[in-house]
Image (cartoon, rainbow, N blue to C red):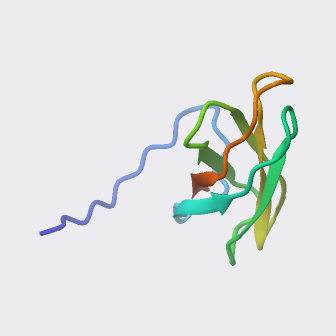
Amino acid sequence: MSLDQHTVTVPTGSAPANTDRILIGNIPAIANGTAAAGVTVTVPVVMSELPASYSVQINPGQGCAAYADGKTETGFNVHLVPLSGTAVIAAGTFDVTVVA
């Protein structure tokens, strides 16, 4: 049985996106394609009703750098970047979690 918890502490110096709620959204196993050696793979991620400011955590599921940009209230782009000019991003899946 789940237990509802209603106390949230916001650390001093942080910038919460909302003052009355916390938003957490998770999408596991988003498919990504592959590309030639050294080429970044970009995948658009769609989520609706996102606030103007939020953070995106990415689990790329493989050895690569990952970042999000183009953040809007309807989604963002995830970029999977090879760690070297000879490395290849493999076709697979990655997970994203949005926190605001």
Quick check: can you spot residue 18? no
Q: Quadrant of residue 54?
A: bottom right
Q: How many marks?
A: 0
- Residue 97 location in percent, x, y? 56, 54
Q: Residue at x 59, y 52 (%)?
A: 94
Q: Position of residue 86 (x, y in %)?
A: 82, 24
Residue at 84% x, 34% y: name it.
37
Q: Describe residue 68's horizontal placement relative to residue 38 as left or right.
A: left
Q: Where is the C terminus found, in terms of image quarters?
A: bottom right
Q: Where residue 76 sits: x, y (%)?
A: 78, 61
Instruction: State whether residue 12 appears in this view.
Output: yes
Above or below, 51 relative to 56: below
Q: Nearer the viewer, residue 34 or 2?
A: 34
Relative depth, front residue between 11 and 43: 43
Residue 26 place in picture, x, y as percent: 52, 62
Residue 63 appears left or right of 52: left
Q: Is residue 65 above or below residue 54?
A: above
Which quarter of the figure is the N terminus placed in? bottom left
For this rendering, which residue is in front, 38 or 75?
38
Which residue is found at the position 71% from the left and 66% from the top?
A: 51
**100 up-or-down from 3: above or below:** above
Q: Residue furthest left?
A: 1
Outermost residue, bottom side: 48
